[in-house]
Image: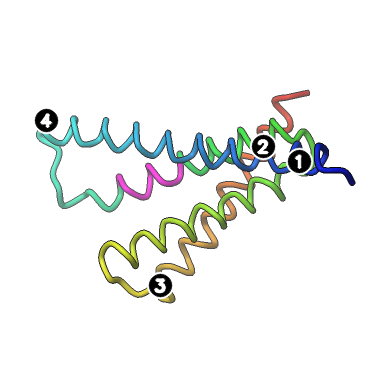
Amino acid sequence: MNKATQMRSFSPMLSGIFYAFVALAILTLITSIILKFSSMREGSLDTYVYFIHGLSLFIGGFISGRGKGTRGWYYGGLLGVIYSILILMISFLGFDSLILTTKSMIFLLLSFLLGAVGGIFGVNFRK
């Protein structure tokens, strides 16, 4: 396998991660604006955060699967694992929270599943 082929096969992963974090930023900004100007309570913020992560993972998996064209579940799931590891590392570095907890393992598993589902839809959308 030459370098150009390797780069093309890895490029959908990079674009998927990029779009996942762009979606994360946009959805977080929208949620912040809604929280500021509405009667939405901060107590239910955990639910919104998980929804934002889920939608971002789905979008990233979709882009990754569509870009690769085959094995969308694999590339989307791999994207979910990379995404969750990056989020957990940011959480550890920024808030000094533990990395290996039950919640983080559940987050890792759900990230894999949501990314894989997004990848499956992305491959099928391409056809």
Q: Earlier in the sequence, mark 1 or mark 3?
A: 1
Tell me where the magenta segment starts and ends, as one range. Answer: 48-55
- State the predominant SS element of the stretch in magenta: helix
Q: Amino acid type of disc 3? A: Ile
Give the residue number, with chain letter if any, for mark 2: 12
Work out how far the residue at label 1 is from the one at label 3, CA to CA, in angstroms: 30 Å
Work out how far the residue at label 4 is from the one at label 3, CA to CA, in angstroms: 34 Å
Q: Are marks 2 and 1 in contact (CB under 8 Å)?
A: yes
The 10 Å Cα crowd at callout 4, few under 14, some 14 to 19, many 20 or more, is: few
Q: Is residue 7 above or below residue 79?
A: above
Give the residue number, with chain letter if any, for mark 1: 9
Residue located at (55% from left, 55% from top): 82
Residue located at (32% from left, 65% from top): 93
In the displayed orientation, state which residue is furthest to the front. 3
* Kind of element beneath mark 1: helix
Work out how far the residue at label 2 is from the one at label 4, CA to CA, in angstroms: 38 Å
Depth check, mark 2 against mark 4: the one in front is 2
Is 66 magenta? The answer is no
Give percent across and percent down for residue 111: 52, 54
Give the residue number, with chain letter if any, for mark 3: 99
